[in-house]
Amino acid sequence: MQKLVDGVHNFQKGMIGVQRDFFERLARAQNPIALFITCSDSRINPNLLTQTDPGDLFILRNAGNIVPAYATSASGGEAATIEFAVSALGVRDIILCGHSHCGAMNGLLLPQSLEDMPAVREWLVHAEATRRIMQEKYQDLEGERLLTATVEENVLVQLENLRTHPSVAAGIAQQKLNLHGWVYKIETGEVFSFDPLEGQFLPLAERPRVALPAAALLAAKQSI
């Protein structure tokens, strides 16, 4: 805890000159580039990963980077955050980012490990489609390969759940909103982005423009 307290003191000491002006401008309004949905895992820092500043990202975090379908969560915090980002802040891009070594996805694969965590087990009901896909499509995988495939499939499942939210559906219909599926590999710093035309996750550094309007993304995925 002392490390956190010392950090706050150092931050406040640095709030002078140009930096203070920057934060005073932020206090007047926010205009984020994107809504960034990712896991609560402490090893992920969205601003560090994207080299962005305060004010650039509107961030939604939870265990497993899960987006409950709107019908099951209209009064929940995830639905409210998504609606505010799209309707009030006018974000044009939503990034849904999973990551390697995800504890939530490991729990999805090994439900017996969640016996003493009933709230986590209940939360992962929103990733039931991911579990079924893994059970029926990836029976030949195990270990890290299975977990990696689970992380990737879950990103795609949650993107589909995201489309059930009215504000997102409206943005898609007006072609004002793009969805991006990413997977972050903690040990190397690599980011892989889902390319709907190729039907797979590919290195983002090599393919910087793989996003399509969300409607086209889903159509391309279903045609593969």
Image (cartoon, rainbow, N blue to C red):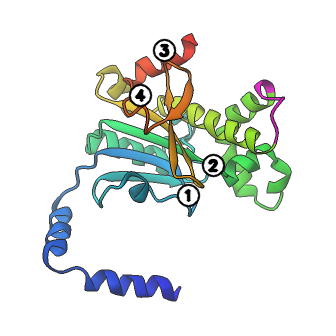
Q: Amino acid at mark 3?
A: Ala
Q: Amino acid at mark 2?
A: Ser
Is label 1 or label 2 in front?
A: 2
Horizontal side, residue 180 vs residue 102: left or right: left
Q: Nearer the viewer, residue 141 or 134?
A: 141
- Give the vertical position of 198 relative to 14 (above or below): above
Relative to the observer, which residue lies in front, 39 or 28? 39
Q: Residue 117 at what x, y percent from top left?
A: 76, 60
Q: Which residues are magenta?
A: 136-142
- Rounded to the nearest angstrom, the CA distance separating label 4 from label 3 is 15 Å
**Residue sitting at x 34%, y 37%:** 93
Position in image of residue 130 (x %, y %): 68, 34
Residue beneath label 3, please? 219
Residue under label 2:
100
Picture quarter with the C terminus: top right
- Identity of the residue drawn at 57% across and 31% down: 156
Q: Measure how far apart labels 3 and 2 are at the Cα level.
A: 27 Å
Task: Kindly report which numbered mark, 3 or 2, lies closer to the viewer in this rendering.
Answer: 2
Residue 140: in magenta span: yes
Residue 135: quadrant of the picture:
top right
Q: Secondary structure at mark 3?
A: helix
Residue to which mark 4 is pinned:
210
Residue closest to the eye, 214 or 143: 143
